[in-house]
């Protein structure tokens, strides 16, 4: 063992989340998914693997991104497979960036375990709902995941053709894959911004009490102003931030909204020749996003899922406006550098982005 490693052990300098406990907790809590006859399950898995290459070809044709890149299949997983992959990606993304646990070795282990249980509960909840995901940090070079039981459950619940729904989901996830593989700087930029945000959490926590009077004033003002751009958990998070951290947060929210909205626009814009029932799927899926029982809606709000749903709509509207104004080639100027990404304020005012980037 090296001297540095000995020092880490003696001081208890360890990661604040025990991802092994997170995975174990999620695996105990997550349900296995719908019962599917073996032949149907095998056919679904094979079709999902095959359709990713076809879907990405359609995305490349529409967007003009990714010419010359290899067409790779997706990884089809069950819910536990998604949990393990998501934990791996999160661990890689946050490695060394989260605020360190207590220097007390024993207490650090307790806190990491507790954080692992909480992370596992979140993973279990999301693991029964996520249809697919492109994780730019999974498997070292990035990994496209398709969660077969959730896709089957969703197309059954929506009562839409399984073949169309599988293609529709893959169009979305392949767009995400192209965003990161066709834009060389995006992966490092995203991870750098996440690390900048996470490393400021200690400062956020220690300074929260000093900012309490201003936070109360802001809450009162927002209660009388329905036009505020943020509410719920996201709004509270913003009020806890220092000005510097809020700037990083704004960039992350803007980027996330762009990526999700761009993918949502593409999956619908590819058109009915590829997904004949696209209009029906979109209408029913949008209604499903807003649905759920009281407990489900509470959990969605606490986990920020409702905020993410809003991101889809805002980002798609931004993309649609820009494409209509300057065409897809003009929109693709967005991937030139971090400086051409939309500001958070520009997402609600796409004409401002067009004026700034295409004067």
Image (spheres, rainbow, N blue to C red):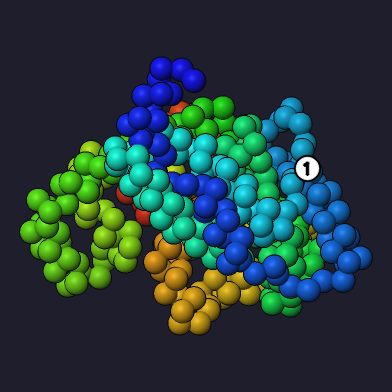
Q: Position of residue 253 (x, y in %)?
A: 39, 48
Residue 260, placed above or below residue 149: above
Quadrant for residue 273, please give it.
Answer: bottom right
Residue at (61, 39) in percent of width and height: 138
* Closer-to-camera residue (311/133): 133
In the displayed structure, does residue 312 sit left or right of residue 76? left
Residue at (56, 75) in percent of width and height: 287
Point out the residue furthest to the right here: 39
Point out the residue furthest to the bottom here: 293
* Closer-to-camera residue (306/6): 6
Q: Is residue 52 visible?
A: yes
- Read off the residue under disc 1: 73
Residue at (36, 50) in percent of width and height: 111
Quadrant for residue 13, please give it.
Answer: top left
* Closer-to-camera residue (323/20): 20
Q: Is residue 279 visible?
A: no
Quadrant for residue 243, please give it.
Answer: top left
Residue 193, placed above or below residue 77: above
Residue 297, placed above or below residue 96: below
Q: Position of residue 202 (x, y in %)?
A: 25, 42
């Amino acid at each position: 063992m090296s001297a540095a490693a000995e020092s880490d052990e003696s001081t208890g300098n360890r990661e604040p989340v025990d991802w092994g406990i997170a995975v174990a907790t999620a695996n105990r809590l997550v349900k296995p998914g719908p019962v599917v006859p073996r032949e149907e399950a095998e056919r679904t898995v094979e079709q999902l693997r095959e359709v990713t290459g076809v879907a990405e070809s359609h995305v490349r044709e529409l967007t003009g991104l990714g010419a010359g890149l290899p067409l790779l299949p997706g990884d089809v997983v069950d819910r536990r497979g998604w949990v393990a992959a998501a934990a791996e990606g999160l661990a890689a993304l946050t490695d060394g960036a989260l605020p360190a646990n207590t220097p007390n070795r024993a207490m650090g282990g307790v806190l990491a375990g507790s954080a692992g249980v909480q992370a596992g509960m979140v993973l279990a909840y999301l693991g029964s709902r996520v249809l697919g995901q492109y994780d730019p940090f999974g498997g070292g070079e990035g990994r496209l995941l398709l969660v077969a039981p959730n896709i089957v459950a969703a197309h059954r619940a929506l009562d839409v053709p399984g073949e169309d729904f599988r293609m529709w989901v893959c169009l979305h996830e392949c767009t995400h894959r192209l965003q990161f593989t066709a834009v060389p700087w995006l992966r490092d930029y995203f991870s750098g911004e996440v690390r900048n945000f996470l490393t400021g959490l200690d400062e956020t926590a220690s300074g929260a009490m000093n900012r309490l009077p201003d936070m109360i004033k802001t809450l009162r003002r927002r209660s009388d102003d329905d036009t505020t751009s943020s509410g719920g958990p996201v709004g509270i998070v913003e009020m806890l931030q220092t000005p510097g951290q809020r700037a990083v947060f704004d960039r992350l929210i803007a980027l996330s909204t762009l990526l999700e909205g761009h993918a949502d626009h593409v999956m619908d814009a590819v058109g009915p020749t590829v997904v004949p029932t696209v209009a029906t799927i979109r209408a029913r899926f949008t209604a499903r996003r807003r649905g759920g029982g009281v407990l489900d809606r509470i959990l969605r709000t606490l986990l920020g899922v409702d905020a993410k749903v809003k991101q889809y709509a805002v980002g798609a509207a931004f993309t649609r406006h820009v494409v209509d104004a300057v065409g897809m080639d003009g929109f693709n100027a967005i991937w030139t550098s971090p400086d051409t990404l939309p500001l958070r304020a520009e997402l609600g005012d796409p004409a401002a982005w067009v004026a700034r980037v295409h004067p």
